[in-house]
Each structure stands twice: as structure tokens, then as C-alpha cells.
Amino acid sequence: MSGRARLALSATAATLMASGALIPLVDPATWFVQAAILLALQSGVGALTRRVPLARPVTVAVQALVTLLLLTLVFAREQAIAGVLPGPDVFREFGLLLQAGGDDVGQYAIPAPLSDGIRLMLVGGVLVIGLAVDALAVTFRTAAPAGLPLLALYSVAAGLSGDGAGWLWFLLAAAGYLLLLLAEGRDRLSQWGRVFGGAARGPGRISGGLESDTGAVAPIRTGRRIGAVALGIALVVPIGLPALDGGLLDGSGGPGGSGSGGGGTISAVNPLVALQDSLNEPDDREVISYKTNAESTENLYLRIVSLDQFDGTTWKTTVRRIQDVPSRLDDPPGLSPDVPRTEIQTNISAADSYAQNWLPMPYPASEVDISGRWRYEPVGRALVGDRGQTTRGAQYEVKSLVVNPTAAQLADAPEAPEALQREFTKVPDSLPPVVSTEARKITQGASNDYEKAVKLQDYFASEGGFTYNTQVRAGSGPAAIARFLEQKEGFCVHFSFAMASMARTLGIPARVAVGFTPGAAQADGSMSVGLRDAHAWPELYFEGVGWTRFEPTPNRGTVPDYTRADTPSDDASDPAAPEPTQSTAPSSEPSASASCPADQQKQGGCASTAPAIAGGSGGDGPPLGMILAVTLGALVVIAVPLLPMLWRKRIRAVRLGSPGRTAEEASARTLAAWLEVTDTAWDHGITPDESQTPRKAAARIVRVGQLGAAPAESVHRLAAAVEQVLYAPRPQPTAGLVDDVHRVRDGLRAAVGRPARLRATLAPRSAARVVWAVSERWAAARARWAERVAKRWAALRRPSRPSQQQG
């Protein structure tokens, strides 16, 4: 097998080994076989075009074209011309699949189902990375930069996956990259043989890096040793890094969002990702405290956002127009003046550890007094942070309405406006028929929408035999609601999703609200809201009343008074002290939303419920150990690719340092300057040749490097100085050698293109001296150790002198 064929095979293997880190993200992993086959075809096309040969850019273009044809054949055959050729319909289909894949990524927990959109993202992503690796490592013969796309592929997978076997995927990805580097090194060595080592060192000679006085070790064998050592050391880093749990995006991909785990904000576009982060916290730490003048707090839910778009699998927010926050918010849509209402005032303080960009407040708010960059979304009546604005440490005042409709007003509500009903009663075709069938069965005998809503609420909350259980495996996908109705176990996510879906099948406008239950009363009259008070509930629309809260989740929150047949709507509670809610007393059971265990992640339930209710992972932010570990990991990821460049800069500074005080030091500096010139030429593609004299080596550098007059003169002057040091009885120091070195370097850089200059800076070839030097030191240390062991063993085997007996 030729060197280039071996390099191409190594590039394909490295891509597949790095893409293995994506396997835990979806189930099943059949996409990997498909990606491997397509990647092999793509690599084969590259090998054929390089044998023609074609120009390098043309080779990459042919591979890209074949990749497009392969993706068309697999994912958009029906839209293609003659089943193969891509046209406008093919690109439109790709766009739809990618959009659907993005939606699936945002809503499913790990492992996500292998939908067509996700499959296109995975297979297409592997092919794009594979094309980049093949182009860099094989076509353009620069294997070191090919590690960047491999690193990007692994980093994306590692950042999304919380798999405990992440070290295995890291090991495979790193081994693939080392395999690629070794293949390139063997290919280069086979072309020009042994690397130039320079003249024999004399006393005071400045080395090229970390050389020792022992004999050289074969570079390929050295590379294997260093690679094994590097892998062993690098494995320590991922062990100390925290796993990133949650869904495929886990709240980190939105505008201004840095994820829930690190105290950042969460996207206002996709708030259905990280309620589990709050519910999984071992400590129910406080995130909000407030004081209110309301007579009772049991119905004072702190609403964050409404989820009004239903795709058959989950609920999410619709991207809507936002505007400046008005001084006085308009009355809620559909609220009639005949419905009793009371305006209350609530002063709210958010903890410093609570940072997300939706503002929790009682619904419906009429005035909001808050500083910072906040915007108003009028349909959902929610405030969202603009340009990174979050709730972290926010203190604000909200005036809101306590709406107290009677059962008669809800029962006599006229039909909702056509536009509102059309938008909020949509159900997708993928919704299982059992949902609407069960809804009609439950509401049989109801004479109006209000009675239907109450029947649905009572069915889930008390009459249907449902159990509140956070350990249930309800599954994910379009059949999740049907499975929940059959198993009759779940928590707030399942109950609110199911009731809102059923209400829509009955023609009742419905959506899901996300926020907090009222919290627990404190001795100072304030209310404390903790992480486990996070909750989800359905809101149904009744003309004349507006969006109305219902509570189908058993043993959670409070059932509204207007849905109780035997409870008056007026509250006679003592206004002097807020009434404790169900979360007031300490309990062994979880608070407003029970914890969402790891197995719940596979059902797509709690992982797709709310904005990131918590902005941090600890009482006052992430633990110090986590911060140090993440910082160390980031430094390693950033610094490792830059090590060759940093080493090269350091060696250059040492070699071109002070000229020396004695004649011996001056001679050593002259040899160091010459070694710097040969290494610089090596970095720019001119391999050293130890068989040549300094004068012939200088002529070769001038010829191959296409140097101008001034750099050429500098090279010859340096060569003459080196010959004088090596051969003259009393060498005379030569002035201006450092300037000559810089002049030669500038000349070499000017004669090559930008890619070659970038390669010489970021991945200098002369960095191989480090590998050889470490190998030499290792060989010397091993020899010394073997000699020491041999001496000890010989001493142990030496027979002892017999003792003389006394006469």
C-alpha cells in the first residue's frame, strides 16, 4: 500500500473513531453504519482523483460533489432529478429535514429517537468532517491541522453526552488522531529519509530543544511511545471534568444562554429543555422570595411563560414579536368587566444563583417595575430579557389581577374569536386517535366547554386512578400521551400536556404554562420559592374570562375555587397573614415538582417542560472544584493544539538570546543561530539534509526557498560563520547574526502562501525534535535503570565468603 493510500485510510479511520462519540446521543445507532459506508465512498473518490492527478482544489470539489450526490440518494431520492441529481426540491427537502432535526434535538432527551432529521444531521456532519480531514491530511498533506475538525466533532458529542463511558470515546478519538499523525510521519520519512541532525555538538553547544547525548531512536517508534504516554496523561483530564446531563441542547444553545449548569441564561425561543435541572437538585434551595398584599397565596402561582405550540410530541413557545414594556399593561384578552377582579402588589427578589431570561410573576400582570433590559411579549403576557439580561439578583415589583370568575360565568362563556380558536386548538395529525377518543369519553354528558374542562381536570386529579410518580417511564414520541393514559402514572409534565391536548381535540383553546407554585410561608411574612416548586399546568381560554388556570396534577398545587362544586369562590382567609400552601410544611415528598431521575430523561417528559428554572447548580453557584476542573479542561483544550507553536517561540527566543561573553559562548550562539535557520526552513517545507556542508545547505535553502538577494546574503553569511566555528583554529565572532536569522525567516514566509505560513506557525515541522529528545531521554533513563538493576542482581547472586570456624 502506498504512503498516500495509507494516509487516506488513516484519515477515514480517525473520522470514524472521533464520530463514535456521537453514538450514545441517539437510539438506535444504525446511522453509524450508514455514515461509515458513505465516508468510505467519499474517501475512495478522493483517492481516485488524486491518482489522476487533479489539482488539489478540484479534488476537494469532486469529493464535495459526490458527497452531495450520496446525501441526495439517501435522504431526498424522491425529490431528485432522475432519483440522483440534486435540484431545488432536494435543497428544500434538506432544509425541512434539518429544521425538523433541530426541533427534535431541542425536545428529546438523550438518547433521542433516530428521526430522519437527526439522521441527516449526524450522517451529514460526519461526512463534512470527514471531507475536511481528508482534504487537510491527504490532499494538502497537513495532518496536524486536521485535528481541529476532529476535535470539534468530539467536543460537540462530549458536551452533549452525559455518558459515563466518555473516557472510552475520548480514547478512540485521540487514538485516531495519533494514527493519522503517525501515518503522515511515516509517509514523509519514506520520501526523504533520516532527519538532519546538524554537526556534532561541542562544548557549550546550544541544542535544538531537548536533545541528549544518546543515540537517536527511530521517529516512528518514538511517535508510538509518545502517543501512548500522551493518551495516558490526557485521560486524567476527562475523569476530573463534570458530565453534562440533560437533553441534547439542555438549555445552552439559545440566545445569551450559557446553560443551566453554569449560572447562565436560557434561550427565550426554546424554553422546554431544563426543568429537570431544577427538579434533580439534591437541595431545595431558594430561588425566589416575595411579599404580597394578597389575602391568600394558595392560588398565587408565579408564571414564567406559556407553551402554545403543540407538534404531537411536546409543547413549546411560539416565536413572537416582542416590544418595549409599557408603563401599564393592557387588560388580558377576553376579560369582561363583569368578572370580579382585585389588583394586588407583589415585591419579588430573585436569588443571585437564579439566572434565566424569563421573568417569573403572577398572572395576569398589569404593571411591572423592574430595571434592566426587558422586553414584553403581549400574547403570552411575559417579560423576556434582551441582550443577555437575566433574573440574577433582580428585585422588582409587580401589580397583577386576581380574577375570580364564577362557575356560571365560565359555563355561559360564548365561543372564542375565530382567530384565537384556530391557533390554540391545532392538533397535529400524528396525535394518536386514542387521545381524542378518551377525551370524548371522559366528557360525555357535559353541556359546555367549562363542564368538559372540569371533567378533564377531575379525571386526572382524582377520578381516573392516576398516580403521581416521577419514576415512571412514559417514553417519548407521538405515542407518549397515549402511553401515559394507559399507564396512568406521571408527574406535572404529563398531566398538563395530556389535559391541554385533550382540550384542543374538544375544540377548547388550550396551552401549557410553566412557572412556580406559591412556595412556603416564612416567619417574616414573606414567601420562599424553591427549586422543587417548579411546576407546569394547563390554561384554557373562556371568552369573557380569558386564559384560566386548571390543576390536573394530583397532590400538586391547588385546585382553583371556580372548579369546585362545593367551595365558594370568595376566600375568607385572614388578610393579616398569608395562608401556607401545600408546600409550606416540611415533607419527605418532593415539593412543587418532584425530582426528575435519570431514567426520566429517556421519556422526553421532564426534559421538555420549562425554561431552566435554576440558573446554577449549587447554593451559591457551582462548587469550586467544578470551576477548577472546567477551567483546567478548557485550558487543556485550548493549549494542547498551541503547544508546538509555543515551544517553537520559546526555542527561538533561547537560541537568539544574548551573544555570549566568552568566545566559547559566542561560538555556541553562532551554531544555535544556524540551527534556527535550518529549523525555520524545515517549518516552511525545506527538509534538512545532514549530508551537506553548511555552505551547500545554505545554497539549497536559497534555491528551494526562492529567497531574494538580502535573505540569500544572510543565509550565506550564517553558513560562513558556522564553518569558521567548526573549522577555524580561533573562530572570530560574527556580528548581526540575529538580524540575519530574522531576515531569512521573513524571506521564507514571503515566498510561500498563506496556508504554508499558517502551518509553519501553528504546526511547525521542527517540533518533531521534542519527540526525538524525549525519546532519547527515555532511552537513556531506561538504559541507566537496566544497568542499575543488572548491578543489583549481580550483587545478589555473588556467593558469600564462608565463615572461618573457631579451633
Image (cartoon, helix red, strand yellow):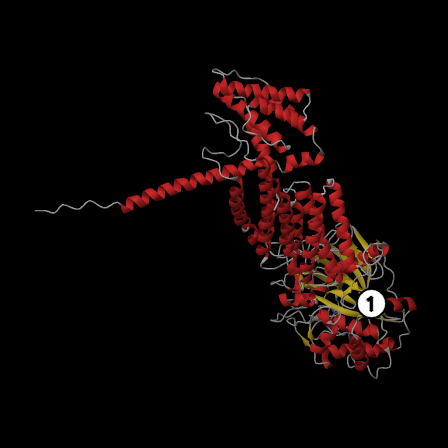
Relative image position of residue 345 (x, y in whole percent): 78, 62
Relative image position of residue 406 (x, y in whole percent): 84, 76
10 Å neighbourhood of mark 1: few (<14), some, or many (≥20)? few
User: In this rendering, is residue 592 above or below 795?
Assistant: below
Q: Is residue 772 visible?
A: yes
Q: Residue furthest bottom?
A: 445
User: Which residue shows up at 68% across the image and 35% down it?
Assistant: 756
Relative image position of residue 487 (x, y in whole percent): 69, 77
User: In this rendering, is residue 741 above or below 803?
Assistant: above
Compare residues 360 and 457 and report the one nearer the observer.
457
Location of residue 622 (image quadrant) = bottom right
Q: Secondary structure at mark 1?
A: strand
Compare residues 331 and 489 and report the one nearer the observer.
489
Q: Tell whether 39 sits left or right of 562.
A: left
User: Which residue shows up at 60% across the image and 19% down it?
Assistant: 717
Q: Is residue 746 visible?
A: no
Compare residues 518 and 500 and report the one nearer the observer.
500
Q: Label 1: which residue?
A: 342
Q: Amino acid at mark 1?
A: Thr
User: In this rendering, is residue 727 above or below 168?
Assistant: above
Relative image position of residue 114 (x, y in whole percent): 71, 63
Location of residue 617 (image quadrant) = bottom right
